[in-house]
Image (cartoon, grey):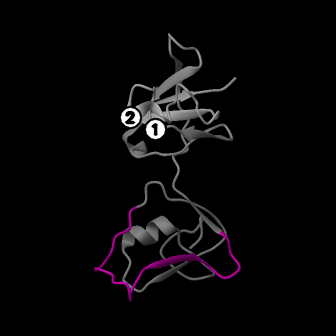
Amino acid sequence: MSPNGIGNNYTETQPCDLKTLLQAGLSCGTTVLLKNGTYFIGDININLNSNCTENTPITIISALGEKAILDGGLHQNYTWSKFIDDTLVYYTTLPPSADFTSLCILDTAGLYPYATHNSSTLGGYTNLQSLIYNLSGFYRKNESALKIIIE
């Protein structure tokens, strides 16, 4: 496989792309070799042709001497709005595809995932308002996200 592969000719000299292969379906016991590059897999599903066992796994690995990166992130820019009551807190609406997101990157800096928004919920230990870890962070609730920045 290659991040820039095309078609369904699965050879080393003419690799396919990973998404095409996985959508076509894989048989148990298959080993998929990945060439160098970043594979964006955020919206990929694996179609299995049968129920695999511990003895017949599907293995996806980098080819010998290659370094493949599987990137399941959502690379979207969002419009953030300031909270009226607190100018250090912003909010945005997230798409359904961001369900269960546990990492948020702002420019090149990671934001710490706080467990709650404020101290009145869940004992409040790791809440966004207190920034107990002294790290800029975010809190996620359903389809909205809050972030706060330490200035």
Name the residue located 55 percent from the left edge and 44 percent from the top edge. 75
Name the residue located 45 percent from the left edge and 26 percent from the top edge. 119
Name the residue located 53 percent from the left edge and 22 percent from the top edge. 90
Q: Which residue is mark 2?
A: 122
Nearest the viewer among 5 and 29 is 29
- Mark 2 crowd level (few <14, some 14–19, many ≥20, 10 Å Cα): few
User: Whole-percent x and y of residue 8?
Assistant: 47, 75
Q: Is residue 8 left or right of residue 61?
A: left
Q: Is residue 111 left or right of residue 49?
A: right
Q: Is residue 28 a member of the stretch shown in magenta? A: no
- Which secondary structure, mark 2? helix
Name the residue located 50 percent from the left edge and 36 percent from the top edge. 126
Return the residue found at the far bottom: 55
What segment carries the magenta color? 45-67
Give above or below for 33 relative to 39. below
Cα distance, mark 1 to mark 2? 8 Å
Q: Nearer the viewer, mark 1 or mark 2?
A: 2
Nearest the viewer among 71 and 82 is 82
- Which secondary structure, mark 1? loop
Does the CB distance between marks 1 and 2 fall below 8 Å? yes
Look at the image and tell me whether residue 97 can be seen.
yes
Label total for image: 2
- Which kind of residue does numbered mark 2 sit on? Leu
Q: Which residue is mark 1?
A: 115
Q: Is residue 66 a member of the stretch shown in magenta? A: yes
